[in-house]
Image (cartoon, coloured by chain):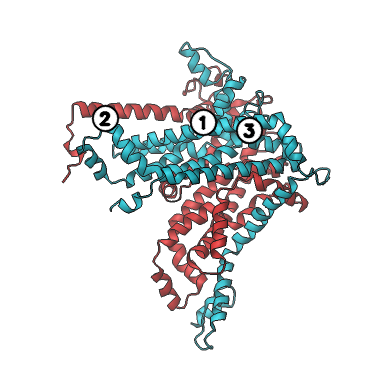
Amino acid sequence: MARVTEVGASGEIALEVRPRARSVPTARQRAWRRNLTGYLFIAPWLFAFLSFTAIPISASAFLAFTNYNVLSSSLNWIAFDNFSTMYQDQRFWRAVRATFLYAFTAVPLKLIFALGLAMLLNNARRGVYAYRAAYYAPSIVGASVAVAVVWREMFGKQGPINGVLGALGLPVTAWLGDPATAIWTVILLAVWEFGSPMLIFLAGLRQIPQEFYEAAAIDGAGVWRRFRSITLPLLTPLIFFNLVLQMIFGFTVFTAPFIISGGSGAPLDSVLLYSLYLYQKGFRDFQMGYAAAMAWVLLLVVACFTALIFRSSSSWVHYEADTEARQ
Amino acid sequence: MIVPRSLAKPTFGPAAIRTGVYHVAVIAFAFVMLYPLLWMVASSFKVSDEIFSNVTSLIPHRFTLDNYVQGWAGFGGIPFVTFFRNSLIYSVAGTLLAVSASALTAYGFARLNFAGRRFWFVMMLMTLMLPIQVTVIPEYILFSKLGLLNTFWPLLLPRIGGQAFFIFLLMQFIRGIPRELDDAAAIDGCGQFGIFWRIIVPLISPAVMTAAIFSFYFTWGDFLHPLIYLNDPRLYTISVALRTYSDPAGVSNWGAIFAMASLALLPVFAVFIFFQRYLVEGISTAGLSGR
């Protein structure tokens, strides 16, 4: 015991050391100690949460009603002016449209690829681990500047995509110069990173008892029927999970549109995704008030969509797998 | 009693053909998936005028290491090793901070009972879904008022609280450890920190590894924070350096850019190859993802 008491002298350990020689602490003292120990453990988190999350969010909410400019340090209360400006801001609406197009195509496509490939790779064939690694690899580098730079050159006028199309006798095009195609290169980059949700689906597929499929096959269920009635319902918790995460990523993607459009959102603002426009307003034009207002709009939209997915989940997410799956 | 299909399968015949088709299809698609990365590496070994003339090929006509020599010499008068070092400082220090704080917090939430625990836990979970855009502006103002722009402080300080994803992952693991171990240690005279340090940390070390790997990935690839906080080119991390010196209008030496892009991804793939096991564990238990 003596050893431990010495350690206790130097820090929080002392709080939980109960030297037997001393009198038994009262219930109140024990509760106080318990609380203190708990808060000491979460202290770093709590400090960071308050200083870098809670207070900044509140500060954002305040700034949204001001015209704060970090360079000139002007700070005036302008009530809802930022929001009415936003309502009339053509670029803001283009950013909203581009972001919705991006999120509502990239996320479903990504999840479809993830599920399809997970099913294709859910077996014990030779080499299947290598295949999984190969399909997962893009996910770990996809969000980097290096890959975005490579992606931009891939779709450049003289890039290998046009090279392949030309070699096949197909028409080549300026992918990044045409507003109709530029955004799709960014979407494709997101879809290319389907590896993480794929691995999550694979983990889920392995949990489904093989007997379910055998029983269904004996009852005459075909491949499609087995997929619709067994695989899909049992995976809905993971589909739900992936959908929420990817939706949030989708609304906030920054690096890819920034690099691919050279920071401008060009051509014709077709790649001006929301975070990119927010960056331009806040850190290029230093209109922090306006950017804060935009950030709050983003937060509310993300919260709405998350709530919508959570609300709808009771009608399509099945949790009985937890109780039925036997070990 | 069900015979595993693989045992019942004949060596030749329709099943073998199906297996063949399967492998060909999966490999072909894997090639398409990996092509951009292979193209990047191949281009880094091509001489400059070959990169966009022999554009689709993955095999250089004339193999050269010049791009690496030139790229390593740096951009704008700053050697590439400076950017590499900056990225390393950010990601190693950031990872150490984030992971140790996450472990402490996870232990607090998973094992200790204190007033307000549920409330703070819910707050922690909510930060999982918080777009960083909402906090980045006031954070920037704060750090600029503190005079900390162009230092690593704005990148590192927010990480002293750990990261919600890692806290959640580590909590899942701590919950799987029988409480009897804690009790036994307490009887032997361990305080809460002793239990955490001697019992819990060794048992959750695989999960700590997982968190460390992802933390390394997130910080190594981080672009937004270095972009807004670091304006001095000597402080640039690789991501900001690559962005600055790959501006399509100003680039003359694409080979060097591709070489440095490949080098930027090298640590990521090295970690991937050596620690695959931990990655897969992290993804399947807490849904940690690569981005």
Secondary structure under badge 3?
helix
Quadrant of the rendered image containing residue B255: top right
Residue for point 54% across, 69% down: B114
x then y, percent, for residue B230: 70, 43
Q: What colour denotes chain A?
A: cyan
- Is B228 in front, or is A27? A27
Q: Are marks 1 and 3 on the same chain?
A: yes
Q: What colour denotes chain B?
A: red
Task: Report the mark closest to the observer, 1 or 2.
Answer: 1
Instruction: Please determine whether, in this image, residue B118 is positioned above or below residue B259.
Output: below
Secondary structure under badge 2?
helix
Q: Are marks 3 and 2 on the same chain?
A: no
Can you tell which mark lies on residue A105? 1
Chain identifier of the residue bearing label 1 in the image: A
Task: Name the residue beneath numbered marker 3.
Answer: A96
x then y, percent, for residue B38: 48, 29
x then y, percent, for residue A168: 45, 13
Chain identifier of the residue bearing label 3 in the image: A
Residue B148 appears in the picture as rendered = no
